[in-house]
Image (cartoon, grey):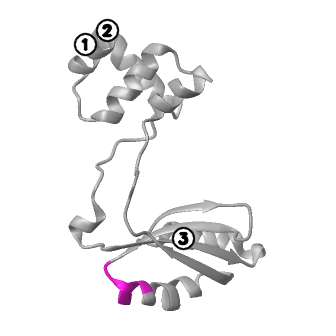
Amino acid sequence: MLDSVDRRIVAALERDARVSFGNLAEEVGLSKTPCWKRVKALEDAGVIRGYSTRIDPAAIGFGIEAFIQVSIDFEVSDAFEAAVKRHPLIRRCYATTGEADYLLQIVTVDMRALDRMLRVELSRLPGVRRTVTSMAMREIKGDISFADAASHALRG
């Protein structure tokens, strides 16, 4: 469980992962060394899994975003998951409950590329029996602040 200082550190890094340790320490009320040690402990504990840049897919040519429910022959689930991890157009994959076994989030450049992805690539992944595709029309909310979510949950 994170304490209030750790939650402030996480919130600050969610806003700007490029913040200097000096500025981060000042923002959360610590000196640089204790702040660095806290960040290192959060990394070591797996709370902070890494740092990345958020890219707008449409701005670099990926105009189609889709969500695909996939049902598979479960005896090949390990092979399916390995293939999904290697596929560059699959942004996210979740094992799910309900009618489908997995939910994929993918990006493609256009409808022709989506058609090819579905018919030629996705259908040939190990064990795929059925897919159901939903198109993203526009993004309403893309990310959350986990620090804010944790604060909200603790109030409950």
Which x, y percent locates residue 130? 66, 83
Query: Magenta segment range?
Result: 109-114
Q: Which mark is residue 2?
A: none
Q: Is residue 22 above or below residue 149?
A: above
The kind of residue tagged 2 is: Gly
The disc labelled 1 sits on which kind of residue?
Glu
The nearer-to-camera label among 1 and 3 is 1
Whether residue 43 sits left or right of residue 2 in the image: it is: left
Q: Would you say the residues marked 3 and 2 are in contact, meaning their CB atoms lie under 8 Å apart?
A: no
Tag of residue 26: 1
Q: Of callouts 3 and 2, which one flags the residue occurring earlier in the amino acid sequence?
A: 2
Q: Distance from label 1 to label 3 (Cα)?
A: 42 Å
**Secondary structure state at the residue bearing disc 3:** helix
Q: Disc 1 on helix, strand or loop? A: helix
Q: Is residue 88 above or below residue 6?
A: below
Do the numbered discs 1 and 3 sit on residues whose CB atoms are within 8 Å? no
Q: Which residue is mark 3?
A: 84
Q: Which residue is mark 2?
A: 29
Question: Mainly helix, strand or loop, the magenta region?
Answer: helix
Residue 43 position in % (x across, y down): 45, 31
> Real-space Cα distance between discs 1 and 2?
5 Å
Residue that appears at 42% across and 36% down: 145
Which residue is pictured at 58% across the width and 87% down the height? 124
